[in-house]
Amino acid sequence: MKAIYQHLNHDDVKPYYNKDSQILILGSFPSNKSRQAGFYYAHKTNRFFKILARLFNEETPNTTEERKEFLKRHHIALFDVIRECDIIASSDSSIKNAIANDLTLILKNSEIKQIFTTGKTAYNLYMRLIGDDAICLPSPSAANASTDLKALVKAYSIILDHIKD
């Protein structure tokens, strides 16, 4: 059976930020699970919130509200590089015809000092579609199984250098 491309947009998952956000972490495009949940990194095998919880020595937030409070407490904004694209299921490697999200609203209405991307696909798309000056973090996806949790936490520790309480 041949995989079928779908043209999808980012309408189901809004940017998360507030006026005190100091770093912006960009994924590529929300997974099917994230679009269904209406929030980022919702797939149960994605290690994003587990990584951040270890980094800040806290319990892993599990609900969307817990995750939002966690992000707010630690001055973290979340969004994605892509506003719309053609994609097969949730496969980053299948993305084509990508159109970038506009980051202006977040950057004008927060204290963002540094932008990070989660994974090489997000980083490459960011560099091609939006600009420069981003730091590439490893993907927290289960598809990046070759990188264990301890190594991910170590790699993500760079964000601590960009957050001032």
Image (tube, grey):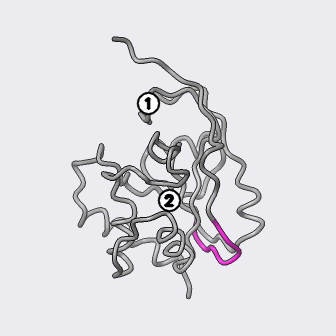
Query: Where residue 81 sits in the image (x, y, percent)?
Result: 59, 46
The crowding category of the residue bearing disc 1, from other C-alpha atoms within 10 Å (few below 14, some 14 to 19, many at least 20), is: some
Residue sitting nearer the eye, 107 or 86: 86
Residue 46 relative to residue 15: left or right: left
State the quadrant of the N terminus. top left
Residue 6 relative to residue 106: left or right: left
Query: Where residue 154 sits in the image (x, y, percent)?
Result: 31, 69
Residue 61 relative to residue 65: left or right: left
- The reply to whether residue 112 is visible in this rendering is yes
Q: Residue at x 61, y 74 (%)?
A: 22
Q: Residue at x 53, y 44 (%)?
A: 35
Query: Where residue 34 sits in the image (x, y, percent)?
Result: 48, 48
Q: Main secondary structure of the magenta part?
A: loop
For mark 2, what is the residue? 135
For mark 1, what is the residue? 89
Residue sitting nearer the eye, 114 or 11: 11
Find out whether residue 138 is within the magenta segment.
no
Helix, strand or loop under label 1: loop
The crowding category of the residue bearing disc 2, from other C-alpha atoms within 10 Å (few below 14, some 14 to 19, many at least 20), is: some
The magenta region covers 17-23
Helix, strand or loop under label 2: strand
Amino acid marked by disc 2? Ile
The part of the image, by quadrant, that contains residue 85 is: top right
Amino acid marked by disc 1? Ala
Find out whether residue 21 is within the magenta segment.
yes
Residue 80 relative to residue 4: left or right: right
Q: Residue at x 44, y 30 (%)?
A: 89
The part of the image, by quadrant, that contains residue 128 is: top right
Q: Residue at x 57, y 69 (%)?
A: 23
* Distance in Å between CA atoms under marks 2 and 1: 27 Å
N-term mark: 2 or 1: 1
Foreground: disc 2 or disc 1: 1
